[in-house]
Amino acid sequence: MKIWIGVTDDGWFNYLRARNPDEVNFWQPSGGREFRVLQPGEPFLFKLHSPKNYIVGGRFFIRYSPLPCSLAWEAFGEKNGVGTYEEFLARIRKYRVRSGYAEKIEPDPVVGCNVLAQPFFFPEKAWIPVPTDWSTNIVQGKTYDTEQDTGRALWAAVEEVAGALEFWRPDEAKDDPRRDAPRYLVKGRLGQGAFRVLVTDAYQRRCAITGERTLPVLEAAHIKPYASAGPNLTQNGLLLRSDLHKLFDIGYLTVTPDYRVEVSARIKEEYKNGREYYAHHGQRLLVLPDVTEDQPSKEFLEWHNQSRFVA
């Protein structure tokens, strides 16, 4: 099993530790370099900048996705480790300049989003010293492997501290922490931000109905709403253009279990319009996830047909 120790600053860590969110975005100032170190479910740990050479928290990696700053803020908000969008944008620009990127001001720079579910933050008395082979020259992070002595000892120390602080749930399989992320997926324990990222990527960043690719107008729609006990699972999501998302949520539009679009006659009756939407009536979804288990659940679609759609 691989372990990644990512370097972060005190501000990000302390802001999130005080709020104890259900998910965090461990962001990179540029989205140009994909994070390929970990597989979903492998541990992603936090280390503060030197001279604070300690492991101070972490959790299991869910997904990497490059997103425009505005969408990263919409998806995660304060879970990005700052209080406002303006502060988030300012930090991104500061680190981009510090890292040697061009000083050209981009209105909506792309950042790399490392999505982590159910993070934990250690109190200072429980901080774990970094492995002895850690170099002070490391800027971004370093990989360890539990098949090797150093990685095995590191993970044992994390397990011991996290267990003592009751950060592990009783049903977690401590002998194989890689099972943790799939358990979140099965039990719907992902946060709203992770849901948006997973749905966006599953649909190849295209509207399921129209094929639209303009990312700022695409939204991850719950088929069965979260407020109605709908889980944050990819199978409970559709990536839709924002206007179609609104119509879907209020029941003027639905998708049948065989993936065909139905548009309610109410639009024409109530608004004397809707020609653009009726053009999609009876059409099969243009975009579906490549992975079968990420495709819309027939159970959730039937719920929407019966409980939300107004024929």
Image (cartoon, rainbow, N blue to C red):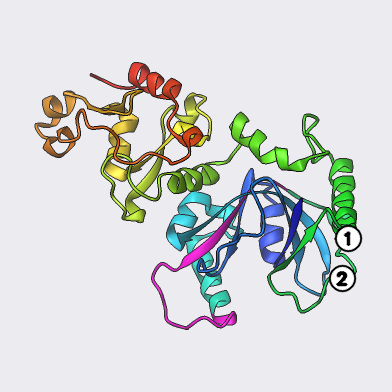
The residue most toward the top is 306
The image quarter containing residue 45 is bottom right
Label 1: element kind: helix
Measured from the top left, where is residue 144 in percent x and y? 79, 60
Mark 2 belongs to which amino acid?
Answer: Asp
Measured from the top left, where is residue 215 in percent x and y? 36, 54
Q: Does residue 160 lie above or below 264 as drawn?
A: below
Q: How many numbered discs?
A: 2
Image mark for residue 133: 2
Quarter holding the C terminus is top left
Q: Does residue 184 lie above or below 5 as drawn?
A: above
The answer to whether residue 295 is magenta is no
Left or right: where 89 falls relative to 276: right
Left or right: where 55 falls relative to 281: right
The image quarter containing residue 149 is bottom right
Q: Residue at x 15, y 39 (%)?
A: 276
Q: Which residues are magenta?
A: 97-119
Q: Residue at x 76, y 63 (%)?
A: 47
Image mark for residue 150: 1
The residue most toward the left is 272
